[in-house]
């Protein structure tokens, strides 16, 4: 039976805790300081990390060396992807990362990819808008960057991103395409953070069946 350690006990950490209780997944530890987790406990557990960009930048070497697998929902560190991935490969620890662990958002990614393939036959300009709560530390969001990358890679264009921070909005992402003859709009709106927690927990369960390596969540569920 899989056991998890929750790294970070903010709003997302609480959501992961609730999701684990719902799914009957054992929680071995919840910690604001991942270095304080007993190494013997860590070696038997999957860590689910929802901390901050600064905390993850500091902690990733320990995460890679301590745990048998790590699921990272923290964003804002993608400029150091190469060194993070190398640390996990060198340690032989499975890493599953995502700009967004929501199943709905990953369906959004898949639909967007297909739509862009069709739209590439026309002449469309594209833009992305993301709206989050005022506590979110990174802007644009990791999800918005992923959306812009999907569009940009397929249409071969630069995609502007507009970021808004309003109240307690869990997360809304909008991709717009416009030509001289029509406009298309794709929207994903999260009602709560629960979907992110459930997806991260699913990733932790999936890690048990994977060979050691670095995986992006969308690639695992869109196979």
Image (cartoon, helix red, strand yellow):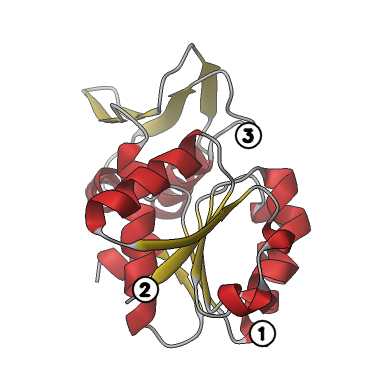
Compare marks 2 and 3 and give the one earlier in the sequence: 2
Does the CB distance between marks 1 and 2 fall below 8 Å? no
Question: Can the viewer see residue 171 in this picture?
Answer: yes
In the drawing, does residue 123 fall left or right of residue 81?
A: left
Question: Residue at left 64%, top 31%?
Answer: 137
Instruction: State the SS at label 2.
Output: loop
Measure the C-alpha gap from mark 1 to mark 3. Answer: 28 Å
Neighbourhood count class around disc 1 (C-alpha, 10 Å): few under 14, some 14–19, many 20 upward = some
Nearest to the observer: residue 145 or residue 116: 145
Q: Give the camera-side residue of 96 and 157.
A: 96
Report if the CB atoms under discs 1 and 3 are less than 8 Å apart.
no
Give the number of the mark in front: 1 or 3. Answer: 1
Q: Helix, strand, or loop for circle 3?
A: loop
The residue labelled by disc 1 is 91
Question: Image quarter for residue 129?
Answer: top left
Alpha carbon distance from label 1 to label 2: 20 Å
Quadrant of the frame with the N terminus: bottom left
Query: Badge 3: how crowded within 10 Å, few (<14), some, or many (20+)?
Result: few
Judging depth in this view, the residue of 9 and 167 nearest the camera is: 9
Number of the front mark, 1 or 2: 2
Label whose residue precedes the other's in the sequence (1 or 2): 2
Residue visible at 65% across and 42% down?
52
* Rendered location of residue 184, percent (x, y): 23, 28
Q: CA distance from mark 2 to mark 3?
A: 31 Å
SS type, badge 1: helix
For label 3, the residue is 138
Please give the residue where the numbered disc 2 appears in the rendered image.
Answer: 2
Q: Tell me which residue sits at (33%, 54%) in the image.
A: 20
């Amino acid at each position: 039976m899989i056991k998890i350690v929750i790294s970070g006990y903010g709003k997302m950490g609480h959501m992961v805790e609730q999701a684990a209780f719902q799914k009957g997944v054992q929680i071995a530890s919840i910690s604001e300081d991942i270095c304080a987790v007993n190494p013997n406990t860590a070696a038997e557990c999957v860590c689910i990390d929802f901390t901050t960009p600064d905390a993850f930048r500091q902690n990733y070497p320990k995460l890679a060396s301590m745990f048998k697998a790590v699921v990272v929902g923290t964003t804002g560190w993608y400029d150091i992807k190469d060194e993070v991935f190398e640390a996990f490969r060198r340690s032989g620890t499975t890493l599953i990362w995502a700009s967004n662990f929501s199943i709905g958002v990953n369906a959004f990614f898949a639909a967007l990819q297909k739509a862009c393939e069709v739209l590439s036959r026309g002449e469309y300009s594209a833009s992305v808008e993301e709206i989050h709560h005022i506590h979110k530390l990174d802007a644009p969001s990791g999800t918005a960057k992923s959306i812009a990358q999907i569009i940009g890679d397929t249409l071969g264009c630069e995609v502007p991103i507009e970021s808004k921070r309003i109240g307690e909005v869990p997360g809304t992402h909008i991709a717009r395409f416009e030509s001289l003859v029509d406009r298309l709009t794709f929207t994903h709106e999260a009602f709560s953070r629960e979907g992110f927690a459930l997806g991260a927990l699913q990733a932790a369960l999936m890690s048990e069946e994977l060979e050691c390596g670095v995986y992006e969540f969308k690639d695992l569920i869109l196979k």
